[in-house]
Amino acid sequence: MELPLLKTLLRSSDYKANQSKLKRSIFSDDAAELYDLLDMAHAKYSHDLKPDEVYALWIADHPVATNTEKADFRDLLDDVQRSEALSEDIAQDVISKLHRREIGREITSLGINLSEGDTSAMGLLKALLDRVADSYSPDDFGPTTSKELDELLAISSDENRWQFNIHTLSRQLYGIGAGEFMIVLARPETGKTSFLVSLTAGPGGFCDQGAKVLFLGNEERTERTMLRAVQSASGMTRQQIADDPDTAMAAFSCAKTNLEMMSVVDWNLDTVESFVHKMKPDVLIIDQSDKVGVSGQYQATHERLRELYRRLRELAKRHNCALIGVSQASAEAEGKTRVDFSMAEGSKTGKAAEADVILGIGKHSGDNEDGQPDHTRFLTISKNKLSGYHGTIAVMMEPDIARYNS
């Protein structure tokens, strides 16, 4: 890389454009000698330099050089001459990176001096940081927010969202779109997984709408969840599926194409993100998101969960997918029909701050008056940045076929 860079620095314009970031120490010993000569020449002359001119200047500065020294310097210039010069923008990037690397080395060296008791190193370090601060400040911020109404309206339009297939829910909250983060909150044995399966594989669900759905499970085996998806798509119980698998799979064909599931027990968020990058889903469901590991040291559970949910929100934006994360509700939500974000287990404000939508699933405690299980469920939207609706919607769960209906 040194030779193309030195060839580039023969040009006066490139040298002047990068002069503030050029340092002798970024070059090896032989190349550094040539750099010194170029530095001196550009300070004196205002035109591009030719290798023969550089050689003539070197000879003039080394009147007693041996034939071997002359031959070595001539060979270096010939190698530079045969190299391809870097383009202007590439040269700037290369020099900037070399400059930053050298500054890092200097900071490390001063840090070692400080650790060995050299008190003068602190002043030198402060001066160095003040001098190079601009080199580490970002200068490419991208475009500012659009002011075009068509674009602004399109981003917030329901046309860009995947519709919820529970009609009473979709009338108040149409669905969820790319880059949006929704938390589903409920107590154990409430029907969280069936709710997600119904939204995904049930009639008119995400899969029927053409969405590519990735379902990551770290609680129960995803083979069981996939069977629930077959039940939800076909409207058949497990026994009916066993008796007539062809009919069940025919009804499941659309979801079979668009739905992928993976068991992610013990996965951390970095692994999840790598898999999302590979699969490129339109809708990502994590059941349960609280159990996903996140790197870092945390003093308490709520700190870990706050960072986890912050990074999940960023994941949805970065990969342009709708993300639904499942979270446990605390014991406070037991037997409650209205489950809001204040009942989130482990972290309350941290989770609520990151979500676009928080939907709690509540139910009555105990059975019906006739002793039969009560399958009424109550969907409470306690945070909603998408449509603004807040309230509770009563629905029915059909556990035998993993569906939620109005």
Image (tube, rainbow, N blue to C red):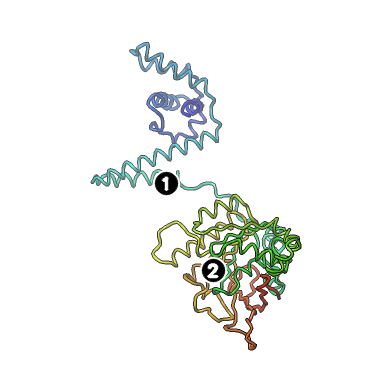
Nearer-the-camera pick, 216 or 274: 216
Q: Position of residue 188 (x, y in %)?
A: 54, 73
Distance of mark 2 from mark 1, alpha carbons?
A: 43 Å
Residue highlighted by disc 2: 327
Give residue 384's quadrant in the image: bottom right
- The vertical placement of 373 against 165, above or below, is below
Residue 282 spot, x, y in % from top left: 65, 57
Q: Which amino acid does the dot numbered 1 rest on? A: Ala
Q: In screen coordinates, is 110 left or right of 198?
A: left
Is residue 97 visible in the rendered image? The answer is yes
Farthest residue, direction bottom: 369
Measuring from the top left, give residue 111's x and y in whole percent.
31, 45
Q: Position of residue 155 (x, y in %)?
A: 67, 60
Q: How many marks?
A: 2
Q: Nearer the viewer, residue 301 or 33?
A: 301
- How busy is the neighbourhood of tag 1: few (under 14 within 10 Å), some, or many (20 plus)? few
Location of residue 207 (image quadrant): bottom right
Nearer-N-terminus badge (2/1):
1
Assign the C terminus to one quadrant of the image: bottom right
Residue nearest the viewer, comparing 327 with 263? 263
Please identify the residue farthest to the front as the structure is shown: 243
What residue is shown with label 1? 133
Residue at image position (45%, 26%) is 42
Amino acid at pointer 2: Ser
Circle 2 sits in a helix, a strand or a loop, which is it? strand
Front residue (pair 104, 295): 295
Residue 294 vertical placement versus 301 (above, below): above
**Is 282 displayed left or right of 20 in the figure?**
right
